[in-house]
Amino acid sequence: FGCWVYKTGNESEMYVMHEICSSVKNMKQLDFSVLVRRANQIKEELKQGVKKPYRELIDVSWGDPHRTGVKPLSFVRQVLAGCLYPQLLESNRLKVDVRQRAQRLLETCAGGSVGSYSDTAGLTQTLKKVSEFITRRDGGVPSHPDSIYISPGSQWSLTNILNILVNPEASPKTGVLVPAPSHCVTTQSILGLGAEVLPYYLTEEQGWALQVEELQRAFDSAKGVCKPFALYIINPGNPAGGVQSRKSMQEVIKFVSEKKLFLLADEVYQECVYGENVEFLSYKRVLAEMGPPLSETVELASFHSASKGLIGECGLRTGYVELVNLDPSVLKLLDNLFSTNSCAPVLGQLTLDLMINPPQPGDPSYPLF
């Protein structure tokens, strides 16, 4: 959001600022932005020899593995290198499975180049691979490529979905239930779209568990303030790290059905699950296994990303959203909205393919992978 600045003598007057919507003006600077700037200052001071009670700074203010020094996966980078510079595929410097994979991926791109556009929703073959991955992950619950959009990261998808759900001119305002603690970028996105954030608090004493009673309290707090329209879930949790049980998820699904809420499931940390008797289950799978009428009526958008987990490729900007039980007219609006941004970066889309289809035992690259 820019402003024209006209200078008259020593004075400057800003115009257009008063035209910017109040919801954007009310957005606050993200805490991690302040931390990042301070971290960069400290790193520069260390380079210049300023004495500190430490010799090195590790910046963990972002959920960015490579920023902290984690090395990228060789297989991923080698395949992408071959896609960017196909002449590499003519030599034996890369393992045969790397060359074969890069060649197959290039064949899915228009003109055989990562520099070409894809369809709005994504590369046809990558969409197919994502739907196959979801079906495997969810124990056979079917997924269809037409219900999936590949995007420049999961946050981008979430913001677009919120654009459809939030009516900035509505009275009362649209309300979105959001966990606390939560991912601050999402909270700011909701506020920036003109909606109200309705925090529900996770129970620290029970491993940051989600309690339906707390959802009810947050829902009731909207009275006289806004109309709750969506519930945002982060599972596995960010930043707290809690993992929901099947029973907890079933309770949430019943709650959103009863309250007629749209369910937004942020599942980007699904590979980061540790501990005994802890298992990641997707909301789509639990919903499907609950059967009708819930499996046919609860509206769900679930998000995944290549920024987290084993691959951790934040800077390549890629993720996807899968939509369940949305009305065709709403899907049409979403398609129109997604199409305003052409397509996700093709190199990122290929990265998504590599994330969901890594080397397998017996492949030449598997031992190093």
Image (cartoon, helix red, strand yellow):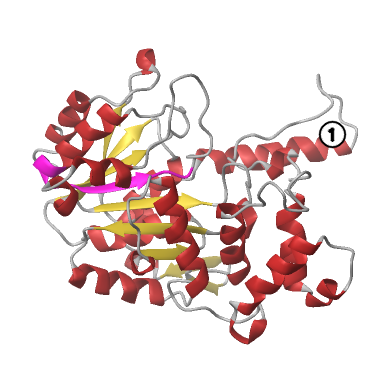
Q: Residue furthest top?
A: 205
Q: Residue furthest front?
A: 362
Quarter-of-image position of residue 202: top left
Name the residue that disc number 1 marks.
Answer: 46
Nearer to us in this view, 350 or 166? 350
* Dot 1 crowding, Cα within 10 Å, few <14, some 14–19, many 20+: some
> Relative to residue 39, is residue 2 depicted above or below?
below
Residue 260 coordinates in the image, percent (x, y)? 12, 47
Instruction: Please say whether residue 28 is visible from this viewpoint.
Output: no
Magenta highlight range? 257-268
Residue 363 painted magenta: no
In the image, residue 103 above or below residue 300: below
Residue 17, compared with residue 205, is above or below; it is below
Name the residue: 45% across, 27% down. Answer: 240
Name the image quarter holding residue 65: top right
Name the element at disc 1: helix
- Residue at image position (33%, 27%) is 245
**Residue at screen point 66% across, 76% down:** 106
Q: What quarter of the picture does the C terminus occupy? A: top right
In this rendering, does residue 205 appear at all? yes
Residue located at (12% from left, 51% from top): 172
Q: Position of residue 148 (x, y in %)?
A: 38, 64
What amino acid type should be assigned to the residue bearing mark 1? Leu
Percent of width and height locating residue 307 = 57, 49
Q: Nearer the viewer, residue 190 or 131?
A: 131
Image location (x, y in percent) of residue 333? 26, 72
Question: On the picture, is 354 further left or further right than 229?
Answer: right
